[in-house]
Amino acid sequence: MLGSDITLKEIEHALHSGEFCFHFQPKISFQTGSIVGCEALLRWKQENGALIPPGMFLPLAEKSGFITDITAVMLTELAEDIARLRALKPDIQVAFNVSAQDLYSPYLVKMLRSFIGNHLINPGNIQIEITETAFVNQNDRIRATLLDLVALGIEIVMDDFGTGYSSLDVLSQLPFSALKLDQGVVGRMSSDSKNTHIVRSSLQLARELSIKTIAEGVENEGVYTFLLASGCNEAQGFWMSRPVPIGDFINLIKTNPKWPSSELGFLYNAWVNHLSYRRKVLDTVYTMTMTQPEEWPNMPKLDLRHSPAHCRLGQWYRDMSRAGFAEETYKTLESVHREMHAAGDVLLKTVKAQIDTDAVIAATDDFLRFSEQVDQEVSRIVALSFATSLRERDRNKAAPADKPVKRDASA
C-alpha cells in the first residue's frame, strides 16, 4: 500500500479494527543513565504484520479532521499502556503528541481528567508534546486547554524546537515545562558547527527559563557524550534504542539498562546559572546608575533573585549533600556562594538608596570578589569531577564486560 493510495475510509477502518498501536522509544536521563520515560509513537500494523509509518496516513487524518477521532480512541489505549508500565516503574513519564485540532476540542482535558481521577495514571505519568505549527493561529481556546492541562499537573513540551520562525515567541507566552531539540538539528551537529551552536544556544535559553531539555535523534556516541557534557537533561534516539512495541519496552525496563551518565553537565549548568546571575546584577547596576530614577520602572525585567536557594548552583550542592557526596567537596563553595548572593543584595540596595559613587564602587568590588571566589571553587570541583570521570572510564575499560550498555545494534 502506497501512502498516496491510502484513503480516509481505510484509516477509519484501521482505527476501529484495532490496527493502530503504540511503539515506545525510551528517554534516558543524562544524570543517572537510566530510562526515565519514553515517547509513545503511533503505528499502523496491518493484518499481514506490515507497519505503515504515521507520515503516510496522519497528514490525511489531520486534513480531514479525523485526527481527533484517532486521538480519542488511542488516548484510552495509551492510558492502559501507561498502567502496565507503572506496575514496573511508577514514576515513568510517557510523552504523547497532539495536534492543534486536539487542543481545540474539549474532550482531551476531559479524558485525561477522568484517567487521573480514576487513578489509572498520575499527572506525572504523561507529557503532552506540541509542535510549533499548532500555534500558528493561536486562539483563546487552545491557550485555555493548555492551562487546564497544566492545572491537572501535566507537563507541556514544545516539540521540534529550533525549526520554527516563531518558537521563541510561542515559548515566551505559553506554559511549557520542557523543550525538545529537533532531531534534524541534533543530527546535523556532526557535520555543521552552526547546528552545534543552535543546540548550545537552545540549552542556554532553557537554563535561563528554568525548563527541562530533551534531545531527540541521538544516533551516535559522540552526540550523546556532547549533550551529556553540555547539561542537556534527557535524550532519545537510535543509539540507545529504536521505538519498540509495548512488550519489548517492558522487557527492556526489566533489564534495568544503563547508559553513560555524569554530574559534570549539571554542575556546568549550575555554573552557567551563577554567571548569568552575576551578569544580571551588573547589568541592573549599570542601567540604574546610568538612568534617571524616574525611568527605573521602565527597565527590562530580569527575574533577579538574591537567595542561594533559587540559584541553580545552590540547588546543585544541596542535591550533592542529599546524594551523600563528601561535604568537603562543596563546603567552601556553599560558604562563598552565600556571601556572593548577600553581596549582590547589598549592592542593589546601595544603588537604589542613591548614596554616593564611592559606596556603589565599594559594594561592586565586594560582589565581584566573592563571585571570583565562587568561580575558583567551581573550577576546582569541575577539575575533580573530570578526573573522576576519566579514572572511571579507565576502570571500565580494564574490567570484564559483565553487563554491556544496552544499545540497539540496528541503529
Image (cartoon, rainbow, N blue to C red):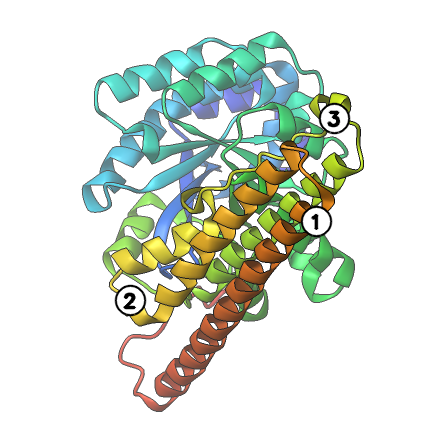
Labels 1 and 3: the sequence-earlier one: 3
Does residue 8 sit above or below 342 in this rendering?
above
Whichever of labels 1 and 2 marks the residue nearer the N terminus, that label is 2
Query: Residue 342, position in %: x, y?
Result: 48, 47
Q: Residues within 10 Å of mark 2 (few under 14, many from 20)?
A: few
> What is the secondary structure assignment of the residue under circle 1?
helix
Instruction: Tell me the crowding category of disc 3: few under 14, some 14 to 19, or many 20 or more residues within 10 angstroms, Cα based.
Output: few
Relative horizontal placement of residue 10, taking residue 388 as reference (left or right):
right
User: Which mark is nearer the camera, 1 or 3?
Assistant: 1
Count of numbered tags: 3
Q: In the rendered image, which residue does mark 3 sit on?
A: 293
Residue at point 48% right, 17% down?
147
Rendering coords of residue 106 (x, y %): 47, 8
Image: 90 above or below 340: above
Q: Is residue 320 left or right of residue 202?
A: left
- Which residue was labeled with disc 2? 325
Mark 3 falls on what kind of element? Answer: helix
Q: Is residue 101 visible?
A: yes
Q: Which residue is mark 1?
A: 358
Question: Residue shown at 46%/68% (left/top)?
Answer: 409
Q: Position of residue 237 (x, y in %)?
A: 51, 55
- Residue type (three-letter) at the residue carrying disc 3: Pro
Residue 263: x %, y % from top left? 42, 64
Amino acid type indicated by mark 1:
Asp
Query: Residue at position x 49%, y 67% from top?
Result: 378
Q: Mark 1 and mark 3: span between their CA atoms?
A: 18 Å
Which of 354 and 2 lies nearest the eye of the viewer? 354
Q: Nearer the viewer, residue 85 or 28?
A: 28
